[in-house]
Image: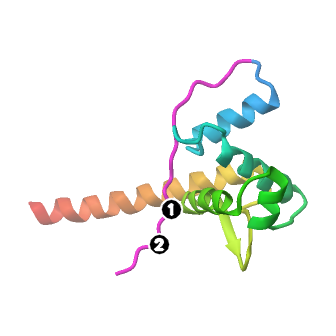
Amino acid sequence: MRYISHRITIINVRKPSLPSINEQLQWLATSLGLFSLRDRNKTCFRIFIDLLKSAKHRRALTSDEIADHLSMSRGTVIHHINHLIDSGIVVRDGSTYMLRVDSLSDLIDEVEKDIQRTLHDLREVARSIDSRLD
């Protein structure tokens, strides 16, 4: 059996009071688990923002375009893009990448649906196991 999976990460971080748009974006990205301790330069966040800007114009980007926009190596971009794909936030279309949806609010709605589907499946399997253990 082959499982198609996304790693859904939600981190409960205190929401900043009276934040700037940059602080709001950083809080949102942190809450979605886009930062790791190893990502000191917020590279993944910068890639996420580049993809968010292109989503507003309904435009997919190649890894070379992202690397060029952000003055990064293509390898670094690919590494972080793969993390974003694994989390279900970014999709690949041929040789281009884009956010799964066109807006942040739609993205949160999709993440919520993913979580609900996962919890439903977990509940179903747990009930099946419980009934067989009696």
Kindly identify the amino acid type of the residue bearing the numbered disc 1: His
Give SS at disc 1: loop
Find residue 4 and name its label. Answer: 2
Q: Which residues are magenta?
A: 1-17
Give residue 127's position: percent from left, percent from top: 26, 60
Label 1: few (<14), some or many (≥20) within 10 Å?
some
The quarter of the displayed image where residue 79 is located: bottom right
Label 2: few (<14), some or many (≥20) within 10 Å?
few
In the image, what residue occupies the spot 27% across and 58% down? 126
Using the image, determine if residue 60 lies above or below residue 51. below
The quarter of the displayed image where residue 21 is located: top right
Marks 1/2 in contact by CB < 8 Å: the verdict is yes
Nearest the viewer among 10 and 80 is 80
Nearest the viewer among 27 and 50 is 50
Q: Which residue is mark 1?
A: 6
Give residue 133's position: percent from left, percent from top: 11, 61
Looking at the rendered image, the quarter that the N terminus falls into is bottom left
Q: Main secondary structure of the magenta part?
A: loop
Using the image, determine if residue 11 lies above or below residue 70. above
Nearest the viewer among 78 and 35 is 78
